[in-house]
Amino acid sequence: MGNLHNGQVEVVCGSMFSGKTEELMRRLKRAQYAKQKIQVFKPVIDQRYSTDHVQSHDANRILSTPVTTAIEILEKVEDNTRVVGIDEAQFFDETLVDVAQKLAYRGTRVICAGLDMDFRGQPFGPMPKLLAIAEQVTKLSAVCMVCGEPATRSQRLVGEVEPSGATTEDQVLVGAHDYYEARCRFCHEPNTITSFQTGLFPKSKLIQKTPEKNETA
Ligand code: ADP
Ligand code: MG
Ligand code: ZN
């Protein structure tokens, strides 16, 4: 278990494409170099790429355990695990905060990566509380796809009803590249899907999009 005082909560947050998963993987790899046992978890809702890996947009991947609830993380963490990584933390409920606290008090280093805001720019799931109780917080930015300035927000590019059945109003619509782009505060439009309406978003892409194995597993 190591030194009890290594127990802490770290949060890596930011918009989509800001490099949260890359940063999480960087920290986990460094822990592995230090011969510390790591375990990685992510919610099953993120079936974007595969259910047993955490994967960044630049296609780096690391083996992970899919879980449906935060409590499952507690059950699955092994005694000799020193570092726990949790990706897409925004998709868990607030139980995740208690789970992270419990692990940290046991001496485990807990690194949570997740979206701080949803596509409307509102705080996402358990992230605000996680940020509050964390010892260390990193807020990353992407590049705004409209103006090139640092992007802090995720713009949803499609509306109406998707093949998955999700609508414009749903907070969760997984599938990064086709549905979202990174934007700064001033280019972000939380209530409209303007880029789609003005044709900036290639409609053809939407129509031709093969229903990307949403139903894996
Ligand atoms: P996150 O987990 O925060 O969504 P990832 O770690 O999966 O981000 O991916 C970050 C990578 O996404 C960057 O290194 C870059 O290659 C790519 N990328 C795509 N669009 C952008 C953008 N608008 N700004 C910055 N990086 C981008
Ligand atoms: Mg990610
Ligand atoms: Zn901008």
Image (tube, rainbow, N blue to C red):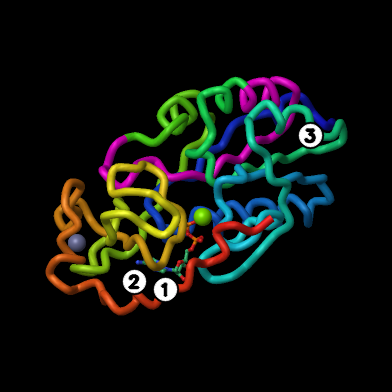
Which of the 4 quarters of the picture holds residue 127?
top left
Drawn side of residue 139 relative to residue 1, left or right: left
Residue 73 percent location from the top left of the image: 71, 33
Which of the 4 quarters of the picture holds residue 49?
bottom right
Residue, x 46% and y 54% (percent of image)? 174
Residue with the mark numbered 3: 77
Please, what is the three-letter code of the amino acid marked with disc 1?
Lys
Looking at the figure, which quarter contains the N terminus? Answer: top right
Which residues are the magenta region? Answer: 99-122
Drawn side of residue 96 relative to residue 173, left or right: right
Residue with the mark numbered 1: 209
Residue 110 is a magenta residue = yes
- The mark that comes first in sequence, 3 or 1, is 3
Are circles 2 and 3 on residues that touch, CB within 8 Å? no
Q: Secondary structure at mark 3?
A: loop
Residue 156 is a magenta residue = no
Name the mark on residue 206: 2
Instruction: Please name whichever residue, 185 or 139, is drawn nearer the observer in this view of the structure.
Output: 185
- The mark that comes first in sequence, 2 or 3, is 3
Residue, x 27% and y 42% (percent of image)? 121
Residue, x 78% and y 28% (percent of image)? 75
Are circles 1 and 2 on residues that touch, CB within 8 Å? yes
Name the mark on residue 171: none
Residue 165 percent location from the top left of the image: 41, 51
Q: Secondary structure at mark 2?
A: helix
Residue 129 percent location from the top left of the image: 45, 25
